[in-house]
Amino acid sequence: MHSSCYPTIYIALFLLLTGLVHTNVGNNEISAERVVGGTPVTKGKYPSQVCIKNYSSPVCAATIISKKYILTAAHCYARTQYPEYLGVTAGSINIYEGDFHSIMGIIIHDDFDSQTGENDIAIMEVHPPFVFGPNIRAAPLPAFGAKDPAVGTVATIIGWGETKSGGPMSYLLLEAQIEIRNHTMCREVYAAVKNVIFPSQICANDAVGGKGTCNGDSGGPLFIDGVLVGVASHIQDCDVIRYPSVFARVSYYRDWIRTYTGSVEEGVRIIVGGHAFEGEYPSMIGIVYDKTIFICGGTIISERHVLTSAYCVKEKPDNYAIYAGSLKACSGDRHDVLKRNNTDPSKNNIAILELVNPFNVWSKLSQPAVLPRGKNDVPAVASETALTGWGKLKIITDVGSSYANYLFVIYLLTWNQTECEKFYADFDTEISSGQICAGYHFGGACYGDSGGPLFVDGVVVGILSFARGCATNPTVFTRVSYYRDWIREIAHV
Ligand SMILES: *[C@@H]1O[C@H](CO)[C@@H](O)[C@H](O)[C@H]1NC(C)=O
Ligand SMILES: *[C@@H]1O[C@H](CO)[C@@H](O)[C@H](O)[C@H]1NC(C)=O
Ligand SMILES: *[C@@H]1O[C@H](CO)[C@@H](O)[C@H](O)[C@H]1NC(C)=O
Ligand SMILES: *[C@@H]1O[C@H](CO)[C@@H](O)[C@H](O)[C@H]1NC(C)=O
């Protein structure tokens, strides 16, 4: 491990949702879903059904839950490497037709486990929003506190998935009736093949056999009386009736869904981001510890100085080096560190590193960031910001590659300071005037590297400091302008 660059999570930041995802979902059948034994539906019968496409290839299904959001399985996201290629088609029963909407934001459940399939649920934001009509409409979600459906209740599955295991996908949407199964029984049959069935899941199959979900149906709905009660997650083998289809139980996630969709106003995005372009963030650098271990992000501020968080560089300066000028973590132009200045790290999570060798020439790929002008420069509430990093992606933590291969950028909005203070007061954490918060008004970034920069209109306004949890909390940044004089004194910029 010491021989290669290996990003680790630093301090209290929990990182997640966007970016490169490599999972081995195939190993334990978390990907298999289809409607076997189904019959074609008539146009407009299931107006909430959409098909998720990777470029133009169908990869999963999803259900419209509002004009902007669809509900699907978390593992569906794992099926594409680049979120920017994801889109959905809506309004058609033909898998190759329908109106195309791109996917702008993805929220994967924080506790999604790609190995076991627990919390296999995700919300995606589409762009442009759907225009509802006879063929496009949201499906109702279970009421808050709704009772779970009784064993034996008839439910409907729909999908374009394979019509037998390994067989072709159906180009027309198919439906089939199945029944809710006893959870204990389901757990037992899956225990035999070493799969855990969780209380947050619901099982269903056909009493006679021959009907169920299969490859390609993942993310699609389980309906009871038109209400979306389940999201298709997995099945052991779609040709063997012994195994019921397993669904994420929507009622279990009712609050989670509301957190993201219920209070989100028009125009506010969730996790929106993508790969940075070459030269787009030329001041971004990566910090390595012990010559090889990626630990944090930072920002070039002069020929000799980079700005980062104090937590990132607590040890002797010569334990650290930086890499600049590359979209890849730990590659590019390497500089050893000569000196470090911290103010009191317990109060001021900011540090400046002085490099042994200065940047002699600026290039398109390495340049100093623009600093805020004065101490009182504070971005307006709800300013759009860009946070860059190679941050670890939560959904791949258990799986091989643990960091983004390429620099990622996500766009956040600055929070109202008072609101952020109130928010963290509940966790006995004080937010000072030397800090600013960003996220969405329902939550934080969950992505990035400690010490990494937050930009507003190209000016580095913040240094990623910490976040409490991930999904619903704002992320806290050291406010660069607050330390403007200190920076000038040390770096002469
Ligand atoms: C998604 O499409 C890209 C581009 O064609 C391809 O490289 C990638 O393998 C596809 N992913 C899946 C899971 O189909
Ligand atoms: C589920 O099955 C178990 C035994 O397998 C049984 O004890 C239990 O009563 C069943 N529950 C329902 C609701 O049918
Ligand atoms: C920066 O650190 C050096 C020692 O490395 C120290 O002499 C200097 O006073 C520090 N400057 C500030 C402004 O803290
Ligand atoms: C921030 O929110 C508080 C209420 O919590 C409000 O009084 C204040 O005006 C808001 N400030 C800004 C700049 O929006």
Image: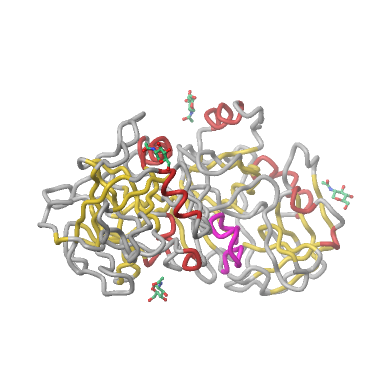
Residue at the spot x=67%, y=62% of the render?
7
| Residue 40 shows in the view | yes
Q: Position of residue 430 (x, y in %)?
A: 66, 30
> So how many labels did they put on this image?
0
Residue at the spot x=26%, y=61% of the render?
210
From the viewer's perspective, is residue 394 above or below residue 25?
above
Quadrant where the N terminus sits is bottom right
404 on left or right of 52: right
365 on left or right of 54: right
Quadrant assignment, res 479: top right
Residue 269 magenta-highlighted: no
* Type of secondary structure dominating the magenta stretch: loop
| Colour scheme | secondary structure
Q: Which residues are magenta?
A: 390-405
Residue at the spot x=62%, y=62% of the render?
284
| Residue 87 shows in the view | no
Q: Nearer the viewer, residue 54 or 380?
A: 54
Quadrant where the C terminus sits is bottom right
Q: Position of residue 90 (x, y in %)?
A: 21, 58
Q: Position of residue 177 (x, y in %)?
A: 21, 51
Q: Position of residue 353 (x, y in %)?
A: 78, 57
23 on left or right of 237: right
Q: Nearer the viewer, residue 171 or 350?
A: 171
